[in-house]
Image (cartoon, rainbow, N blue to C red):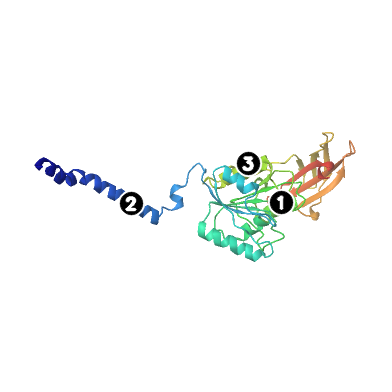
């Protein structure tokens, strides 16, 4: 009986350090639960946990192909429903979520691109997909931490609108990625470029082309002088010299028959913010 009593009396002293440690662990766990560590503390340097605010287009629903793709790549995507009937209501919704979540990057599609441009977003980067900035909002410029994606075959928002946005923002053509075959940009290549753009803008590095001579990623012309330029006919491959009339604007598109093979080409002429002429020709049938 005495031995048994002695064991019972020694029990608290033997396990006291263990109980003390358990109590400390539990207290820290409760403290973490009620006072969580900020999201930025856990931010991965490989961008696998990018926090993205996605703003959908007009008459679009949440949970579409593009935000779903970003989630499939491990991104933390917040996607509010934006009212279709009132742009200011949509902007207010996006602004409130931006202020409360402070995302790493904002991705805006079509009308959502216009919303993104009008959000007070400080230095947060923008990825704009066929932005409808000429239809909604009052902002007509974007910062250097912006990448645009657009298709020349977009029959809803003209590709030239994105060229004009670059011009007014004094950005080079390298900030515009020509992708996709329509307005939706829901094909695999477009989705991959969208994710790549988010990675580039959240990497903490400046664009590689900011320190190099800026040239167009889709330039296929030779500029002869200020009044003439040259393009390659997609039908016959001949180099065609055409006159340049800058009085018609910095972004021009017109149809011209090749003087060699007589096939029609859609001519795209652009003058970038540095005054360089970009000329490109596509077969006319690609547009019909």
Give the residue at mark 3. Answer: 192
Q: Is residue 240 left or right of residue 160?
A: right
Give the residue at mark 2. Answer: 28
Query: For numbered disc 2, what is the local secondary structure?
Result: helix
Which class describes the residues within 10 Å of circle 3: few (<14), some (14-19), or many (20+)? some
Give the residue at mark 1. Answer: 163
Residue 178 placement (x, y as % from top left): 70, 44
Residue in view at x 62 percent, y 61 percent:
118
Residue in view at x 46 percent, y 51 percent:
39
In the image shown, does 175 or 158 lie closer to the viewer? 158
Q: Nearer the viewer, mark 2 or mark 1?
A: 2
In the image shown, does 151 or 242 lie closer to the viewer? 151
Question: In which quarter of the view is residue 208 placed?
Answer: top right
Q: Nearer the viewer, mark 3 or mark 2?
A: 2
In the image shown, does 228 or 80 lie closer to the viewer? 80
Query: For numbered disc 3, what is the local secondary structure?
Result: helix
Question: In which quarter of the view is residue 84 placed?
Answer: bottom right
Residue 191 visible within the image: yes
Residue in view at x 31 percent, y 48 percent:
25
Residue 73 placement (x, y as % from top left): 57, 42
């Amino acid at each position: 009986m005495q031995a048994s009593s002695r064991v019972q009396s020694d029990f608290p002293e033997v396990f006291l350090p263990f109980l003390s440690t358990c109590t400390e662990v539990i207290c820290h766990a409760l403290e973490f639960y009620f006072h969580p560590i900020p999201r930025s503390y856990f931010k991965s340097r490989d961008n696998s946990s990018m926090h993205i605010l996605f703003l959908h287009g007009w008459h679009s629903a949440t949970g579409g192909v593009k935000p779903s793709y970003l989630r499939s790549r491990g991104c933390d995507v917040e996607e509010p429903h934006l009212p279709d009937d009132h742009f200011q209501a949509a902007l207010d919704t996006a602004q409130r979520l931006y202020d409360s979540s402070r995302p790493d990057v904002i991705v805006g599609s079509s009308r959502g691109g216009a919303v993104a441009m009008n959000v007070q977003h400080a230095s947060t980067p923008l990825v704009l997909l066929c932005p409808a900035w000429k239809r909604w909002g009052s902002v007509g410029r974007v910062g250097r931490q912006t990448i645009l994606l657009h298709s020349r075959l977009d029959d809803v928002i003209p590709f030239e609108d994105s060229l004009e946005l670059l011009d007014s923002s004094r950005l080079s053509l390298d900030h515009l990625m020509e992708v996709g075959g329509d307005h939706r940009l829901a094909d695999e290549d477009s989705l991959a470029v969208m994710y790549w753009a988010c990675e580039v803008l959240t990497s903490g590095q400046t664009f590689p082309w900011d320190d190099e001579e800026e040239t167009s990623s889709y330039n296929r012309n030779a500029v002869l002088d200020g009044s003439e330029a040259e393009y390659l006919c997609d039908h016959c491959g001949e180099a065609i010299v055409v006159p340049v009339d800058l009085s018609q604007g910095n972004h021009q598109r017109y149809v011209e028959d090749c003087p060699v093979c007589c096939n029609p080409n859609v001519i795209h002429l652009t003058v970038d913010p540095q005054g360089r002429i970009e000329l490109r020709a596509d077969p006319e049938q690609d547009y019909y």
